[in-house]
Amino acid sequence: MTAILNPTGAAPLRPPPTRPAPEPVTMGPVGPVLELPGTPASALVPVIRDGQAIGAYVLSGGRVRYRPVTDPDRLVAAATGAFAIAVLTATVAVVGRRKPPAIGAVTMGPGGWVSLRGVRPPALRPATPRPWWARVLRARRLVVER
């Protein structure tokens, strides 16, 4: 009979091996369905990763929406990092805007004279009006006016 059903002479075909029954499905990263009270029927399905809720599916009014959960630790870390960068930027800006000293290096010249070589002379003060108290008292300057 083998020759009639299988003219090539190969071994007869066997039925595939039976597989064991599948194990019951566990929820895994999705939590149990929670029914929410209210007039429109709605349900909440939490999504869990590493034992921590990362979001939830909300089934309401025939629509399914995913709502992520904000992690407060990541939020604090991001705010701290942004604050540190802002402080660093402000510090660099303040240090970069510093004015150089008004007088350069002061050295002793020949004969004990103070040498300020290469320094511009200070700008003259503009003529300021007399203060109000000097006008009231009719005060005069002690310096000889020219």
Image (spheres, rainbow, N blue to C red):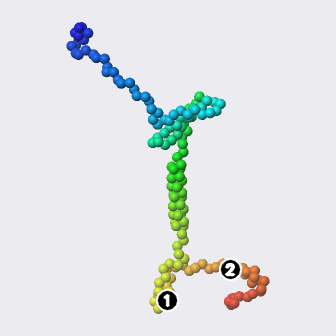
Q: Report the label total.
A: 2
> SS of the residue at dot 2?
loop
- Can you say whether 11 is above or below 56 in the image? above
Dot label at residue 127: 2
Q: Quadrant of residue 4?
A: top left
Instruction: Tell me the quarter of the image containing the C terminus.
Output: bottom right
- Can you say whether 61 is above or below 48 in the image? above
Q: Would residue 119 be found to the left or right of residue 2 on screen?
A: right
Q: CA distance from mark 2 to mark 1?
A: 31 Å
Dot label at residue 122: none
Q: Residue at x 58, y 79 (%)?
A: 122
Q: Mark 1 belongs to which amino acid?
A: Trp
- Residue 65 in sight here: no
Q: Between residues 96 and 8, which one lies in front from this camera angle?
A: 8
In the image, residue 45 lies at what x, y percent? Answer: 53, 34
> SS of the residue at dot 1?
loop
Dot label at residue 113: 1
In the image, residue 72 lies at what x, y percent? Answer: 53, 49
Instruction: Tell me the quarter of the image containing the N terminus.
Output: top left
Instruction: Report crowding for label 2: few under 14, some 14 to 19, many 20 or more residues within 10 A (C-alpha).
Output: few
Q: Residue at x 47, y 84 (%)?
A: 107
